[in-house]
Image: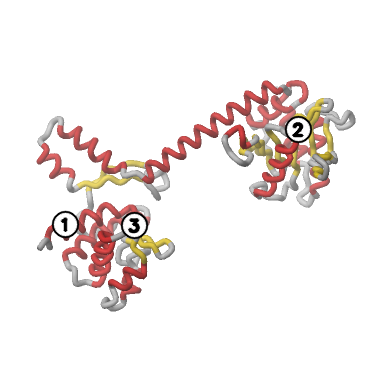
Amino acid sequence: MENLEKWNELCFILSESIPSNASEQVFELKVIQAFEKLGWSHFKREISVRENIQLGASNRIMPDIIIKSGETNLFVIEVKNPSADLKNPSYQNQLSSYMRMLRLNFGILIGNEIKIFVDGSLVGSNQSELLERISFKKDNPQGLNFINLFQKDTFSNENIENYIQKKIETIKENQIIKNLKNEIIKTEYSEYLKTELKNKLLIEHSESVVEKVLEDFKIKVYDSTQTEIQRTIYAQSPQNDTENHNGTLQELELEKIYRKVPVWFNKPNQKNSQILINYMKLREQKTPVTFFELQKSCERIKNFSSGYQGMKTISERNNAKVFDEVGKIISLWEPGKSFVEKEYKRYLRRNKG
């Protein structure tokens, strides 16, 4: 528990004892004091402060703090006022510059928390990568690990390399997870899931029965925030009714789509019907469809602008959100896209010839 007590003492030095109006220079002295507690000596120049380093014929750098062993630079520390926002990219860029010029694989940014960065080349990046954020909380397990890594008595290149490698593996794994989530968001997995369910049902039932069952269902895949594709729900498509439904704004908007879009395609003389049908016809000819192209195709529709506006926004009084518009490019709103496409195909079959 000795090292945990050291961490708690660092919390006191670098956080609890710091006045709210402390300058960066005062805080820098506190950082020096903290690393002296970890066994590094300012007197013996193991803690080198604002060392003026010549690089080449004309370049000089002056990092806040370098921790050294003899003439060997071990790691560099950039100090920022505790009131500063460490998310400021210029702070990371400054630290990265020192790391690169001093040929160090990692560096530490200290302000209202501790951030440990690794050289980007180790993770296939052009800039340094954040390995870990450590908040100044007593008995913090991350703080205990920080003491074990950076106190002089236990500091070793092997321990640091093992630490960096484990963190890099975590970073790469998180990137794979992120990429897979994006793939799920961008891919039509709903059709795949529907096919899988259909195949399962076909084991015990005829194809005609299964298709009649599934035509009244819709697969929706959301993430945990209910905003994009991720969590899978197999839910029956709502019928045309006027029930009040509880749920997210998106779910309520989908209820409108399920009620109104079939009506629009059944009554093509309505304003909203004409706007949607004109868009779908343009979409068949070319994609993407621009606002100006839709506007021109709807020039005979009275109050086109207000009607269209109500079809691309989510609100209690809108018609139903079927459109998204980005940079004057119109697309079908993703959550309701497949349902609108399905109803349009039915409309085309009814009006064939």
| Colouring convention used in this rendered image of the protein | secondary structure
- Position of the N terminus by quadrant: top right
Q: Earlier in the sequence, mark 2 or mark 3?
A: 2
Q: Is residue 339 above or below residue 71?
A: below
Secondary structure beneath disc 2?
A: helix
Label 2 vs label 1: CA separation?
72 Å
Judge whether 116 appears above or below 267 on screen: above
Q: Amino acid at mark 1?
A: Arg
Instruction: Give residue 333's mark.
Output: 3
Residue 9: mark in rendering = 2
> Residue 198's image quarter?
top left
Could you say whether the residue bearing mark 3 is in a helix, strand or loop?
Answer: loop
* Amino acid type of the residue that numbered disc 3 sits on in the rendered structure: Trp
Tell me whether the residue at label 2 lies in contact with that at label 1, contact meaning CB atoms closer than 8 angstroms.
no
Describe residue 12's horizontal placement relative to residue 311 as left or right: right
Gap in Å between the C-alphas at discs 1 and 3? Answer: 19 Å
Residue 97 image point, x, y percent = 71, 42
| Snapshot quadrant of residue 314 | bottom left
Front residue (pair 91, 137): 91
Q: Position of residue 120 (x, y in %)?
A: 62, 37
Q: Nearer the viewer, mark 2 or mark 3?
A: 3
Which residue: 27% across, 45% down?
219
